[in-house]
Each structure stands twice: as structure tokens, then as C-alpha cells.
Image (cartoon, coloured by chain):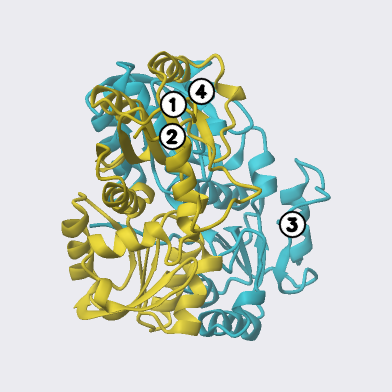
Chain colours: A cyan, B yellow
């Protein structure tokens, strides 16, 4: 029996309930179209969209916005050649692009976090899942060893680390995406006693500078920035596995991207 | 003749005129105190404050906030041991800390940008200084060579680069601090035809992802993130030189910090 795009979206939204204010809308395509294939991705880059089309996908589920802005502010791009070429590909292919950001973060536990923790093989180390952060107690290792472990598990070429790299850590605060800012991260050190915070990204003058001061004062604290995509892509891979299990007759793909940055 | 702290602040503010809304206020100390010594820095870290005190400085001029937040939101930190130890040092020493952020960026050209361009030995390559960005035409080099040049001139151990590292670039858009976001950076590619943007920091899903798409479409574009402090520290060193020339009888120091992040 044919499955329509709207049925997939309803299924995704159902555990949370419809949000009145959200960036999670269908950005292109017709919700009444029959689903031929689904792909999930961190961000619908030009390469990802083309790959999805090549694989016969007509519903692409993206975590971040397609046009380099959290709130899809496209007016400044309307005469931009990169925007125009990408928009042309989307329109001519008829591919449906659904953003799945706010809902996925509101799953309990957060779907992005579940995927990240699974990718790190740390599920059994979780001591508490909160809406925006998870607390874990991992086998003791130095911050430098931890950085190596993260790179190896996530298949990434570098992470950025602040603080004392030689200190042994075991209590971890984990925050995916743009949650590495001071407001969310710093209280985990003081109130929850974590040794190290691992986050996607955050303003550089907040948590990293707090950690610098803490270390200068003789405290053992560290901060690792994985990268935004690096911290959230596993959660979109996990989503593909979930959809595969729920809709076994539909082709479901996860489309990865390379790290957007190289460290030189 | 004794120079009071207020006279230094008045001198700094004078070219811009007093702003009614600004983060640039005297955060500690008494403006009527006689100045014994001045230091400038990117951010008043615990180490920087201690170094300033050790050098007899009683007026520390910082670009970023002291407590890991652009708007000095200290309520969440009031029971934090790192905050308390730093605050104790400030209070017991009586050191005056003045934030010089908004005014310095409103100098024409922007004082932070002037210092950065001087540190890069690029003054003669500037084609246009705008309020938030400078445009330059530099001798042709690949993005990878450019990254090496930036690291060498700024004395930093790594930069992050997105795009085609092998492309030759000559037209540069330069943005200091947290101005690497799409709203400020992306139009420089399309409207001003720059090959590469060099910025402090910015959201990872904005300009870097735009550059990724552009390169996928066969366009020659690149983005280099220097780091926030790395892009603004030279502007605070330049401020120290300016103050030294204006107040030759006062000891004026510039206090550097190590890069807050290591790339691992």
C-alpha cells in the first residue's frame, strides 16, 4: 500500500505532539506524494541532495536548514548563484525536504543525543539524560586519550580541546549541536561535577575561556568541541535506522558528508 | 601631573562619542584613581589579571567580557568557584577593568581590524574598509599557503579551513571576531567577488556550508576561521601602541594569552 510523505511526517511528529512554533516544516515537495525512498542527513548540502536524487529518494529529512540559516532567511540570497543553483536542483527534481530539528531534540531521550551516545558505544555509561545534556561516567582516560577515542569512533580528523589535556577524566557532560555555550555547559562543571564537557560548538569566549581560568586556578577541567555536524550526524544516522525498522518496505538511506572544516 | 582612569576612558571614547547602549563600561575600580600602569588584552582571564597586577598595572582594558558572557550575565555564576576566585582577585587588588569592545569596533577604520591588518603586514593591500569587513587584494597564493601565512604571522598553531585548499586566491574578505556568520560573510562572495573569507568565528552551518556547496558547484571559494581571540588580539596589541604614543609617561603593556584551543 502506498505511503504518503505526510504519513512519514506524522509518524515523526507523533511522540512529541505538534509544535506551534518550529523550524520543522516541509521546505519543498508535496506531502501527498507517495514515498519512493527516504534519506536522512545532517544538512541537505548540494552534494547530499544530488546523492539522494541519484538513489531514487523523494523525501530527504535534514536536521539543519538547507540555506545556511537557522530560520531560512533566504532574502539576502535571492540573487546568489550558489543559492539559485541549489534551489533549481530542488525544484526540478521535485524532492521533498523536511527539516527534523526541534522534534528530534524533543524526543525523550533526545534522538540526536541517543545516536551520538550509540556511535560512541557509551550507552551503558549514561547516568542521566536531561533535555539538553547527558551525564556519563566513562572509564578513566586522559583528555588527550578521550580526544583520540572520539575521533576514532566518529571517524573525524580533528577535535578542538581546551584545558588540561593530561588530566584523567571520567565524569562527562555531553551536549550535541550548538549547546556548548556557557549558559548550558558551565553549570555542569560546578553543579554536576563533570571533569570534561564534550559539545558540538559554542561561542569561543564562553566555556573554553571558563575552562582556561579553571585550569589556571588549579582545577581539573577540560572542554572538547567536536564540531556541530560531527556531534549531530550520528543522530540522523540513528533516525534512518529507526525509520528502516518502522517502514521495512521503503528504501531508507543515511547520507553522510565530509567534515566541513580541515584543521591546518 | 597625575592622570586619572577617567581621563584614559574619555580619551578612548572621544573619537566615537558616548554610546547610550554599550557593553563598554568600567567593570571594577574607581575612575578617579590615578593611573599607575595600563595593560590591554583580548580578554581579562585570571592569568591576564594576575600578570597585570604583577606588573603594577591598575587599569586593564579588555576587549571581551571577564565572565564568559557578552552581556556580563553573572547570576548563574554567583556560587561558581572559578567565578568567585577570579572576582576575589579583582576585588582584593582593586584593579580597574574597562571593557573596550563597541567603541573600538566603531573607530574608522575599526581599531581591531587595523591591528589585525598590521599584524598580517597587509596594510598596503586593503582596497576598502567597511564598518564590519575589510576587502583586500593580496599576492596570489593557494588557500593552503594562505593558511600557513596566517599561522606564521599571528603565531598560532592551527586554523580551520573550508572549501578548496588548492585554489589560488587573491581577493580576500576579512572579518574579525564573531562576524563569520552568513549574514555578514556570504554577500562578500556574491556581491564583492572575494575568493576567500577570513574570519574569527561564526556558526558552522552558515558560511562554511555555503562554501562547501559553492565548491561542489565548481566555484572557487574558501573560508578560513582564525579563531575569535586569534583574530582580535592583534587589535588590542595595536591599542597598547596607540596608548603608549599618547601617554608616553605611563607604563603601557599588552598582555597576550595562549590559544584557548588546541587542535588534536
A105 shown above or below A193: below
Res B197 visible:
yes
Check if mark 3 and mark 4 are on a common chain: yes
Residue named by callout 3: A9
Check if mark 2 and mark 4 are on a common chain: no
Residue named by callout 1: B33
Residues packed near mark 4 inside 10 Å, few (<14), some (14 to 19) or many (20 plus): many
Residue A94 pos. (x, y %):
67, 80
> Can you tell which of label 3 and label 2 is closer to the viewer?
2
Residue named by callout 2: B5
Give the CA distance from mark 1 to mark 3. 65 Å
Check if mark 1 and mark 2 are on a common chain: yes
Residue A188's label in the rendered image is 4
Q: Are marks 3 and 2 in contact (CB under 8 Å)?
A: no
Give the CA distance from mark 1 to mark 2. 6 Å
Give the CA distance from mark 4 to mark 1. 39 Å
**Given the image, what chain letter belongs to the residue carrying mark 4?**
A
> Can you tell which of label 3 and label 4 is closer to the viewer?
4
Q: Secondary structure at mark 3?
A: helix
A120 shown above or below A250: above
- Residue at position x 43%, y 77% from top? B214
Front residue of this view, candidates B12 and B86: B12
Residues packed near mark 1 inside 10 Å, few (<14), some (14 to 19) or many (20 plus): some
B242 shown above or below B171: above
Amino acid at each position: 500500500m502506498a505511503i504518503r510523505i505526510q504519513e512519514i511526517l506524522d509518524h515523526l511528529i507523533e511522540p512529541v505532539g505538534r509544535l506551534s512554533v518550529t523550524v520543522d516544516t516541509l521546505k519543498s515537495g508535496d506531502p501527498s506524494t507517495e514515498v519512493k525512498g527516504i534519506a536522512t542527513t545532517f544538512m541537505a548540502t548540494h552534494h547530499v541532495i544530488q546523492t539522494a536524487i541519484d538513489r531514487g529518494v523523494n523525501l530527504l529529512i535534514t536536521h539543519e536548514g538547507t540555506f545556511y540559516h537557522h530560520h531560512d532567511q533566504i532574502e539576502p540570497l535571492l540573487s546568489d548563484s550558489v543559492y539559485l543553483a541549489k534551489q533549481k536542483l530542488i525544484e526540478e527534481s521535485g524532492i521533498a525536504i523536511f527539516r527534523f530539528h526541534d522534534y528530534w531534540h524533543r524526543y525523550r531521550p533526545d534522538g540526536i543525543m541517543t545516536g551520538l551516545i550509540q556511535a560512541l558505544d557509551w550507552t551503558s555509561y549514561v547516568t542521566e539524560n536531561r533535555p539538553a545534556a547527558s551525564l556519563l561516567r566513562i572509564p578513566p582516560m586522559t583528555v588527550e586519550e578521550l580526544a583520540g577515542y572520539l575521533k576514532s569512533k566518529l571517524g573525524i580528523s580533528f577535535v578542538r580541546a581546551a584545558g588540561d589535556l593530561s588530566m584523567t577524566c571520567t565524569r562527562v557532560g555531553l551536549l550535541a549541536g550548538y549547546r556548548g555555550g556557557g549558559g548550558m555547559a558551565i553549570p555542569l562543571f560546578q553543579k554536576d561535577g563533570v571533569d570534561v564537557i564534550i559539545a558540538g560548538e559554542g561561542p569561543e569566549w564562553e566555556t573554553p575561556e571558563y575552562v582556561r581560568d579553571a585550569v589556571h586556578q588549579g582545577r581539573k577541567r577540560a572542554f572538547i568541541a567536536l564540531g556541530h555536524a560531527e556531534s549531530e550526524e550520528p543522530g540522523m544516522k540513528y533516525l534512518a535506522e529507526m525509520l528502516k525498522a518502522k517502514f521495512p518496505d521503503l528504501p531508507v538511506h543515511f547520507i553522510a558528508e565530509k567534515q566541513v572544516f580541515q584543521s591546518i
